[in-house]
């Protein structure tokens, strides 16, 4: 054998030995080691490990509680909480890829993130809470005394994008007559603290409106010249936090998702009478401590939903007065489309695609409830005397297209009835305001007859609203001197504080 051939054979054997060593190191040795580990280790106590995305909102304190972890441990489930600082785009992508299996969203954020993604990788399995006053639109009284004063091209909403404060602003823009607003009335801030800092440096004559949440709302109101223009206690079904599951994970592990939901409701029930302390402890753990007063204000502004209320929202219990989840999604879709928050509806007009009711139906079939729970609802507004109606404080004029009447009559056309049906849906989401209905008529002809016609048209609209389910205590038709138009306006109002 020549030296060349000998060298080639040696090189070949070196390659073979190298490959063999690599196979041993990369595959055989680890497999043997794993086999030995398996023979000399115990089985994990957990059946599932779930990565759960959320952020530092105090409404999620139950999810960070020891009670939740304890309940999960009983189900042999380990949940790792992943704080993504409310980056909803990142959150929806993580659900799509399977990097996280469950998460929390506000419904509007879920709709927007899904619209941006162009698909629906996650579905709602439970409702956590609804904001009822924790978010507010505040401004200087002199410049912005009420919602109608927002109808000005100088008005700007200073808010945190993709947050409940943006939702609040969009609900107001979509529902009230604010046609004079500029094409882009939103100024984006980093967070509520940033909004508060901008308020501190603003001129009292500014037409800026500051949209933020507790405890910053209370801090602003320490200034007697500032006030709440509108807050989330006045409407319902728009700022709602939900638990979602990635569809792939849910399809493969429905039992695990049901166990997580059950554990959450058990943990909430264990804390429902001591939420202030839970929020205080949670804030301290997160490094953003609150005072007891701030925690109390925050808890007062959040309606945490119990098991029975979830059954109602998902349509499992009927006749409760609570909104169905499908109607919430539909209303939020409409607000986002009307206000430019999304360009297309990710559900394509099928809001039921965004939630899954079988998890809760399974719990209800098992007669699950963690303890004695009641279904709460909005209290009906009391009837007012004529003096109280006269003293009602106007808040804002609803956005309603001009009603069409047959000439010289009070007869509502079919088109007008459709407009009023839409108004009924809006008014049902603003249950804490009274409604003044002002009629109008032509200036031609007899002034006295036209004045009566204006009142009668307002009464026709009032009767239609009450027949359609609006409490008669809330509405009042009022007359006025005709101005020439045939329209009817709808002004929301409240009693003086």
Image (spheres, rainbow, N blue to C red):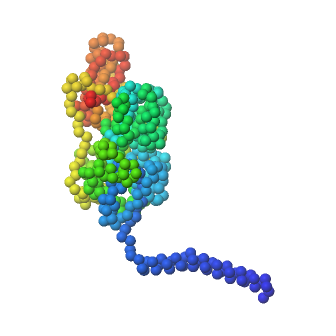
Q: Nearer the viewer, residue 126 or 349?
A: 126
Q: Nearer the viewer, residue 127 or 67?
A: 67
Q: Is residue 222 above or below residue 131?
A: above
Quadrant of the image for the C terminus? top left
Looking at the image, which residue is at 44% across and 43% down? 191
Quadrant location of residue 149?
A: top left
Q: Is residue 416 above or below residue 259?
A: above
Looking at the image, which residue is at 68% across and 81% down? 14
Looking at the image, which residue is at 37% across and 35% down? 220
Quadrant of the image for the N terminus? bottom right
Is residue 82 visible in the rendered image? The answer is yes
The residue positioned farthest toward the bottom in the image shown: 1
Quadrant location of residue 328?
A: top left
Residue 120 shown left or right of residue 14 in the figure: left
Q: Is residue 342 above or below residue 24?
A: above
Which percent across, then down, holds residue 460?
27, 26
Which percent across, then down, holds residue 379?
23, 39
Which percent across, then down, holds residue 361?
29, 56
The residue positioned farthest toward the top in the image shown: 446
Residue 115 shown left or right of residue 267 in the figure: right
């Amino acid at each position: 054998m020549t030296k060349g051939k000998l060298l080639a054979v040696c090189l070949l054997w070196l390659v073979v030995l190298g490959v063999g060593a690599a196979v041993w190191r990369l595959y055989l040795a680890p497999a043997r080691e794993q086999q030995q580990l398996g023979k000399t280790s115990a089985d994990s106590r957990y059946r599932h490990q779930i990565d759960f995305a959320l952020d530092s909102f105090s409404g999620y304190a139950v999810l960070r509680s020891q009670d939740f972890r304890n309940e999960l441990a009983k189900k042999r489930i380990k949940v790792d909480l992943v704080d993504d600082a409310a980056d909803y785009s990142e959150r929806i992508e993580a659900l799509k890829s399977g990097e996280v299996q469950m998460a929390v969203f506000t419904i509007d954020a879920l709709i927007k993130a899904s619209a941006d993604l162009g698909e629906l990788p996650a579905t709602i399995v439970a409702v956590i809470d609804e904001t009822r006053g924790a978010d507010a639109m505040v401004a200087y009284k002199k410049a912005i005394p009420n919602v109608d004063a927002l109808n000005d091209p100088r008005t700007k909403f200073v808010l945190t994008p993709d947050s409940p404060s943006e939702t609040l602003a969009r609900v107001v823009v979509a529902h009230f007559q604010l046609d004079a607003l500029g094409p882009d009335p939103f100024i984006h801030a980093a967070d509520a603290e940033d909004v508060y800092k901008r308020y501190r440096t603003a001129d009292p004559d500014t037409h800026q409106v500051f949209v933020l949440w507790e405890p910053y709302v209370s801090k602003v109101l320490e200034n007697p010249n500032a006030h709440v223009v509108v807050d989330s206690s006045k409407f319902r079904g728009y700022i709602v936090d939900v638990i979602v599951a990635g569809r792939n994970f849910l399809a493969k592990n429905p039992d695990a998702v049901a166990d997580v939901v059950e554990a959450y409701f058990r943990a909430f029930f264990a804390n429902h009478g001591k939420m202030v302390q839970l929020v205080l402890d949670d804030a301290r753990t997160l490094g953003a401590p609150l005072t007891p007063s701030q925690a109390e204000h925050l808890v007062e502004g959040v309606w945490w939903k119990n098991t029975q209320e979830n059954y109602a929202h998902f349509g499992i219990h009927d006749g409760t007065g609570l909104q169905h989840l499908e109607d919430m999604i539909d209303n939020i879709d409409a607000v986002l489309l009307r206000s430019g928050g999304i360009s297309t509806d990710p559900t394509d007009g099928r809001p039921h695609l965004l939630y899954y009711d079988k998890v809760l139906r399974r719990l209800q079939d098992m007669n699950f409830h963690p303890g004695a729970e009641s279904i709460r609802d909005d209290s009906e507004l009391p009837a007012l005397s004529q003096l109280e109606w006269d003293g009602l404080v106007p808040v804002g004029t609803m956005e309603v297209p001009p009603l069409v009447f047959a000439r010289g009559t009070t007869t509502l056309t079919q088109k007008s009835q459709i407009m009023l049906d839409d108004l009924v849906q809006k008014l049902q989401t603003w249950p804490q305001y009274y409604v003044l209905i002002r009629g109008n008529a032509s200036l031609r002809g007899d002034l006295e007859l036209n004045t009566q016609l204006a009142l009668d048209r307002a009464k026709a609209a009032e009767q239609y609203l009450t027949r359609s389910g609006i409490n008669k205590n809330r509405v009042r038709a009022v007359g006025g001197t005709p101005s020439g138009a045939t329209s009817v306006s709808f002004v929301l109002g409240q009693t003086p504080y």
